[in-house]
Image (cartoon, rainbow, N blue to C red):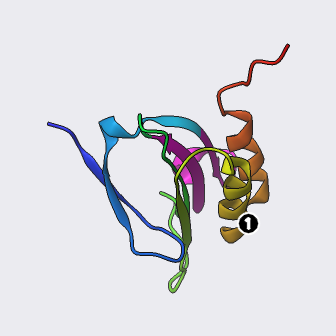
């Protein structure tokens, strides 16, 4: 049975996808402090690509397993793209929306390399 995930989007309602139809092609992750299981805050950006060429760039910043103060509210952003022509721009937008521009750099660095001659 395929699992689904619901992704928060920017400027539109959330989308629900089947994980197997949208493999992750790049990701960047961060957590506060030196030990992940004690982190007060965690964040990620992921890029998924469908076989038809569409891409989803999304991220979330929220409380980690170490807990967060009462009233804390994380953030999330996401874009559904027709293709990958403006992928870098949207990764940077997600990082900026969450206050994690360095996380965008990590995600961009994890993209499949381009072949140049």
Q: Where is the C terminus found, in terms of image quarters?
A: top right
Of all residues shown, which one is farthest toward the right? 117
Q: Quickly name the residue at label 1.
A: 96
Instruction: Name the residue rendered at 33%, 38% in the picture.
Output: 21
- Neighbour tally class for label 1: few under 14, some 14-19, many 20 plus, Cα within 10 Å: some
The residue furthest top is 117
Q: Position of residue 49 (x, y in %)?
A: 48, 40
The quarter holding residue 111 reads top right
Residue farthest toward the left in the current orientation of the protein: 1
Res. 22 image quadrant: top left
Q: Is residue 33 left or right of residue 66?
A: right
Q: Which residues are magenta?
A: 27-49
Q: Residue at x 62, y 46 (%)?
A: 29
Please give the name of the residue rendered at 73% of the width and 24% of the height, measured from the top-left corner: 114
Taking depth in this image into account, of 49 and 40 the one nearest to the observer is 49
Task: Indicate the position of residue 31 as horizontal and vertical percent values.
Answer: 63, 52
Q: Is residue 43 above or below residue 10?
A: above
- Residue 25 vs 75, above or below: the answer is above
Rendering coords of residue 72 (x, y %): 54, 80
Residue 114 against residue 60 in the figure, above or below: above
* Front position in the image: 66 or 96: 96
Q: In screen coordinates, is 62 left or right of 52?
A: right
């Amino acid at each position: 049975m395929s699992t689904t995930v619901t992704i928060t989007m920017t400027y539109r309602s959330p989308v629900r996808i089947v994980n197997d139809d949208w493999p992750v092609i790049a990701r960047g992750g961060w957590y506060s402090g030196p030990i992940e299981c004690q982190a007060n805050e965690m964040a990620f950006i992921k890029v998924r690509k469908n076989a038809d060429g569409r891409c989803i760039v999304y991220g979330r910043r929220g409380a980690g397993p170490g807990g967060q103060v009462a009233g804390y509210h994380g953030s999330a952003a996401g874009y559904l793209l027709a293709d990958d022509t403006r992928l870098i721009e949207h990764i940077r937008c997600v990082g900026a929306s969450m206050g994690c521009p360095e996380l965008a750099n990590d995600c961009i660095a994890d993209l499949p390399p381009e072949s140049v001659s």
